Image (spheres, rainbow, N blue to C red):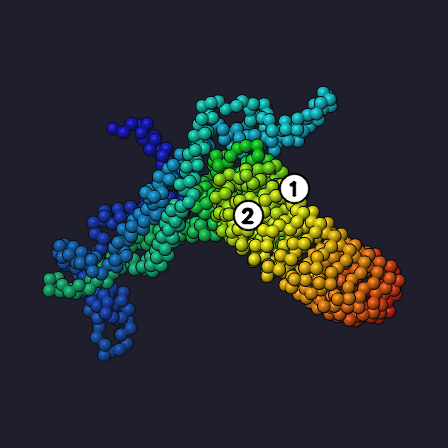
Amino acid sequence: MITLTELKCLADAQSSYHILKPWWDVFWYYITLIMLLVAVLAGALQLTQSRVLCCLPCKVEFDNHCAVPWDILKASVNTSSDPGTPLPLPLRIQNDLHRQQYSYIDAVCYEKQLHWFAKFFPYLVLLHTLIFAACSNFWLHYPSTSSRLEHFVAILHKCFDSPWTTRALSETVAEQSVRPLTLSKSKVLLSSSGCPADVDSSKQSLPYPQPGLESAGIESPTSSVLDKKEGEQAKAIFEKVKRFRMHVEQKDIIYRVYLKQIIVKVILFVLIITYVPYFLTYITLEIDCSVDVQAFTGYKRYQCVYSLAEIFKVLASFYVILVILYGLTSSYSLWWMLRSSLKQYSFEALREKSNYSDIPDVKNDFAFILHLADQYDPLYSKRFSIFLSEVSENKLKQINLNNEWTVEKLKSKLVKNSQDKIELHLFMLNGLPDNVFELTEIEVLSLELIPEVKLPSAVSQLVNLKELHVYHSSLVVDHPALAFLEENLKILRLKFTEMGKIPRWVFHLKNLKELYLSGCVLPEQVSTMQLEGFQDLKNLRTLYLKSSISRIPQVITDLLPSLQKLSLDNEGSKLVVLNNLKKMVNLKSLELISCDLERIPHSIFSLNNLHELNLKENNLKTVEEIISFQHLQNLSCLKLWHNNIAYIPAQIGALSNLEQLSLDHNNIENLPLQLFLCTKLHYLDLSYNHLTFIPEEIQYLSNLQYFAVTNNNIEMLPDGLFQCKKLQCLLLGKNSLMSLSPHVGELSNLTHLELIGNYLETLPPELEGCQSLKRSCLIVEENLLNTLPPPVTERLQTCLDKC
């Protein structure tokens, strides 16, 4: 025997699903009940009616149908004027059939002549109603959805009733509603005690009720804390929510089942509304029945009356109205399902109004059932969302950061860097604003002096992000974000304040091409895990390391043999061991900067594929080893700048393939004539030396395009310099020139000329021949411009293009 307690539990289980039923689902329920009543009423009338059809024999036929007395009278009046027309039969009709014969005729006419819609109308209504009812409840009882829905409803009730939820929301609302009052109290404390008031006092719970909290479904905050039992319950709910989210968020079964049942309802509505009104006309009161039983009854045609016709017409019309209401509601629900993505549920509004900014958006079935719960009462989702949040001090600060750094403010920080890429540089923030991920145009993201940065999965919205800079910040990368970076990130720059190991997530960036590391330790302290990690960077082509080490780490020379560019900035510390460089046979560019080198390392001469060598800011005083560079057939760029080189050996003429040579910021006094045997040179920088003249043999550098001798002691330029017809950039500033040769006008390709800081008194009018020279690229004292003829000055002034 079922007890009242069991019945109550059953009723509660059924009523709990109301949370997931929107208003149209409730409306369907009541319409379905009314439809069921219509079907029951029509069926009852049909079953209780002893004689549905009442048929009488037709003794007179007129115009191929059974005639009635007034038809005969009308026909007699019309034919009385015609003497040749016979008069109709007498008007008196006698029905003398037996009772069983009438019953037989009624039954035959009911089966053969009565339209099927009038006959089965109650059953059609019942069938339609059952289909509608099944569609409305199918998703609640379907095996793949019912267990999840029941689990969700159970969790939702626990979340709603949990004391922890009430306290969390109460503190949030209290902080926003009473912040001005709390701040004013702090001022009173400051004036009365003379001590600074605690600015965080607004975050404390207030001992008195706050107006407006009860209306939001939230109790007033109290100073009490949760006891151990309530804390354990909240912890258990957290675990249940995490497991539920893990199982449900990746699927959309509930969504698809609900959508399919609505589509079935819409299709059924279209079918019903298509044929029911049409067949409604077949429910008629009078039925002309022709039965070939003349041998038994003596009559062939009968006139029948359908006794339920009028009431069935009323019920059918009322049923059509119900179907229209049901169909319109179904169409609205289908529009609701399709007009926006119900597979994404955002707590954006709640994040803006509360301090729980880490509440994640959910998707698929999880998002859909939350959308349904919102139709019942949005408060359920708000209270449920507390258990999706990792409550911590950092997360409380996150919402404030989002409010401060709006999309508009972040857009104002977007700039184009020197590589013409759109860059966003964030400096000294408390975290990473979520609104950053709305700026899909970002190509370079730079984070500097941000203590703790967590890169969420939303970074995948930055579809154009190719470069990431992390300076003096601790970056944690979520797995979805790492998957995005793994595929899209090409350049990574890391700079650490303290010595430490490279983050493990770096070695997952399989498509990384350029890696810049500054301040981290890569020598003997590197762990075995990191050694294996570098081996995974298959596509790495450029590695920049800025640190103080004594030798090039073995991890670089052994595990990165395909590296094409290696840049090592040793920050002034002496680099001792360089023999392992021989292993890097694929190296095309090598930079050894600030390594305190006194001589060019011999291991470099084994790098046959080397194109560029940069030995900036070392302690080179002599470069006699330069003769060995002739074995490097591919060497085209040599940078020996910012050293203490006193002279250039004559063997430099053996470097016939040299195209770029930087010897600036040295102590060079003379140029060997063999230098001008490097006829492929198109870039030559001799700035900031002690040169007093330039040899006439410079004319042999026919490919020279860039020539700089800024800050020397040159008094005169050779005419051979102006035979370098391809010269585009000529830097002669801060020398001792007294005049500029008129042959400068022969440099038709010249686009940049620097003369400032000399002893010039006039400029040659032949500058007019430099048709490519712009005013903005002529670096000279303003008073010297007045020495040029007006046509030359006007031509220079008309074009304001920048170099």
The mark lying in front, picked from 2 and 1, is 2
In the visual, does 223 lie left or right of 267?
A: right
In the rendered image, which quarter contains the C terminus? bottom right
Labelled pair 2, 1 in contact (Cβ < 8 Å): no
Q: Helix or strand or loop: what does disc 1 sit on?
A: loop
In the rendered image, which quarter contains the N terminus? top left
Mark 2 closeness class: few <14, some 14–19, many ≥20 residues within 10 Å: some
Q: Is residue 698 above or below residue 436?
A: below
Q: Position of residue 492 (x, y in %)?
A: 57, 48
The picture quadrant where one finds residue 353 is top right
Numbered badge on residue 580: 2
Label 2 sits on what residue type? Asn
Q: Residue furthest left?
A: 295
Distance in Å between CA atoms under marks 2 and 1: 18 Å
Q: Is residue 40 above or below residue 84?
A: above
Q: Say whether residue 317 is visible.
A: no
The picture quadrant where one finds residue 8 is top left
- Residue in the image at 50% along x and 24% along y: 226
Q: Is residue 84 above or below residue 181?
A: below
Label 1 sits on what residue type? Ser
